[in-house]
Amino acid sequence: MSSEATPRVSALILPERWELPGRPDGAPAAVQDAYRQTQFLLGGDLRLLREGMNLQLQIVRASSPSRYRTHALAAALMPWSRAFLAVSDATTLTLHGSYASCPPLVRLACECVAAAAQLSAEELPTFEAWLAEAFHPDETHKAVTIGMGQFFAGSTLAADPRLSAVYRAASELARPHLGASLVLTAVDSNAQRLALTFADQSFHLGWAQLVLGWLLGVCDAQLRLVTSAGTVFHITEETATAVAAWTDRVGATLDDPVRCRMEPVDDAGEPRWLLVNVRRQPGAAPRKLLL
């Protein structure tokens, strides 16, 4: 396809609302218990996440009329949609106690949030160049050419402190590192025993706090980036005010000193990660784990 005939952006298909996953009736007892305890102990996090996800949908819906449907909007919406679903799926996994499955989704969400910001702004020419070469027939393979269009928004990931922190931490736990595998599958181990589990979905307060904190951080970064100056989205004053108030509450929630979190530390010149407030239940003594 030539640059003179690139596709127009059609009407958007999007959900009316985003709701938290329902109770997993019929699931194993451990999954049902994880759902119940997460709702009870971290209901505030979940409600805050639901509000942030619906603010995102509100912005997309307000930007869906034809006058806003530019290639810049499309460049942002494609990765944003992937980020939104990754956060949604990670929420379900967290409520079901599948904490070990969440870091890859969180890493993907971070990369897509950053890509959406850059592709709709300074990297729009990259999107336009890719689109100009897409959708032409390939006679060799009897296929329609799309093109991979490899892209990584490293500068946005590095420039946004909250998004960068989430991305780096989730990326480390998403890989098959030995320490990451141990804390995700045998977190109750000590010098005397390896407390191995296999496909365990028992509730763990620390992991639930950590992952939900990551998801709130991703949602916060997305909303801040799409409401920033020069955005291609239609942002009303009411929406901007709601987003600002929501991000303030997210900051207060994530700054809670008793919350489980994963922090980069310098250990005699070696960069490492410190997990703090690691505990399975609220009454248990918190642990620190140095990775």
Image (spheres, rainbow, N blue to C red):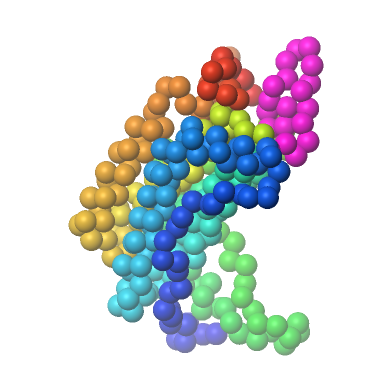
The quarter holding residue 133 reads bottom right
The span picked out in magenta is: 183-201
Query: Residue 170 in the image: x percent, y percent?
Result: 58, 39
Q: Is residue 216 left or right of residue 277?
A: left
Asked if the stretch drawn in magenta spans residue 207, the answer is: no
Q: Is residue 169 left or right of residue 222?
A: right
- Magenta stretch: helix, strand or loop mostly: loop
The residue located at (54%, 47%) in the rendering is: 91
| Picture quarter with the C terminus | top right
Furthest residue toward left: 237
Residue 237 in sight here: yes
Classify 58 as above or below 157.
below
| Picture quarter with the N terminus | bottom right
Query: Residue 152 in the image: x percent, y percent?
Result: 54, 54
Classify 74 as above or below 100.
below
- Which residue is more in the foreground, 73 or 101? 101
The residue located at (65%, 86%) in the rendering is: 137
Classify 273 as above or below 126.
above
Asked if the stretch drawn in magenta spans residue 186, the answer is: yes
Query: Residue 71 in the image: x percent, y percent?
Result: 41, 73
Query: Residue 216 in the image: x percent, y percent?
Result: 44, 42
The quarter holding residue 149 reads bottom right
The residue located at (51%, 85%) in the rendering is: 2
Furthest residue toward front: 26
Q: How many marks?
A: 0
Residue 109 in sight here: no
The residue located at (37%, 38%) in the rendering is: 250
